[in-house]
Amino acid sequence: MQKLIISVGINGGELSRAESPHLPISPEEIARSVNDAHDAGASVAHVHVRDKQGLPAHDLDLYRQVIERVRAHCDIIINLTTDVRREGGFATLDLRPEIASFPGGTVNYGDGVLMATMPTLRALAVAMREAGTKPELEIFHDGMVGQCRALIAEGLLDEPCFFQFILGMRHGSDADARTLIRLVDSIPTGSPWCVCGIGDASVSMATLGIMLGGHVRVGLEDQTDYLPGEPATSNAQLVARIVRLAAEFGRDVASPAEARDILRLRPR
């Protein structure tokens, strides 16, 4: 098997301190959390930034502050959000991140909708190619795989694509073994993939990902508890558990440089 890429969702764009008192909000807190997660074993960090009120922001200066602090410490792969729901959501591509999120399509998201039409996805694919950024194809349900394959057929997504299965979200696909195996079987052969289980499904999905030869994402964006009823204290804590699980299954953990090689990114 390939070495295991551990990705960490640092803070997301939905949670508040009321839901997770340890959620990093300021650029300093976000960068510190990324650096600690790297030291614990993560090779990819998915980053959102927040304004002074803790609300989602697309302020490039805030992103730059995070990136500068992280780069002073380590070479972790930085994966920036591209939020198709908000005006200016593509702006992070101006920073030319190595990886950025790419929703595989539309899905009900809480009481709202993550609306990602095919024209929007085509525009995002073109913008990512121009920025030299690899899309992280976020898959919340089976239909999104079909839409991504259509974009591959149109020549808008370059293979091998990187698929991120986000399972257990309300209105998305279930977080169970049958669902994960079906999704893995539905993507183009040779595509690297990663799995993220939402909430209590985090550890079971991570274990399956390790066993099946995929990669794993954890983090406060996706899970606020370390154990049921026991809040997670940091992203590094969640990453360290995956490192221990990987060791139990005899699977080595990838460094950022090794993750770049697996994902076909340019060496730093």
Image (cartoon, rainbow, N blue to C red):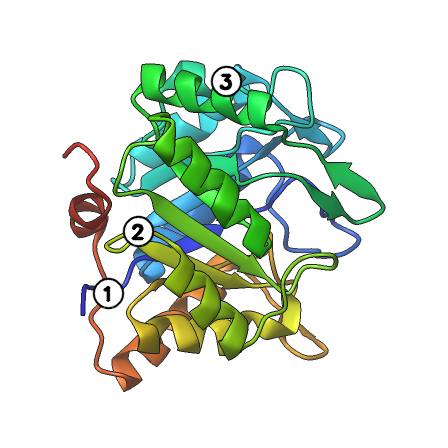
Sequence-first tag of 2 and 1: 2
Mark 3, residue position: 123
Q: Secondary structure at mark 2?
A: loop
Residue at (85% x, 46% y) in the render: 111
The answer to which of 108 and 81 lies nearer the viewer is: 108
Sequence-first tag of 3 and 2: 2
Residue 35 % position (x, y): 38, 47
| Residues at circles 2 and 1 in contact by the CB criterion of under 8 Å | yes
Above or below residue 235? Residue 56 is above
- Can residue 208 be seen in the rendering of this structure? yes
C-alpha gap between disc 2 and disc 1: 9 Å
Residue at (82% x, 40% y) in the render: 112
Residue 44 % position (x, y): 35, 47
Q: Quadrant of residue 251?
A: bottom left
The amino acid type, in three-letter code, at marker 3 is Ala
Q: Residues within 10 Å of mark 2 (few under 14, many from 20)?
A: many
- Can residue 203 be seen in the rendering of this structure? no
Mark 1, residue position: 253
Mark 2, residue position: 43
Q: Quadrant of the C terminus?
A: top left
Sequence-first tag of 3 and 1: 3
C-alpha gap between disc 3 and disc 2: 28 Å
Q: Secondary structure at mark 3?
A: helix
Q: Residues within 10 Å of mark 1 (few under 14, many from 20)?
A: many
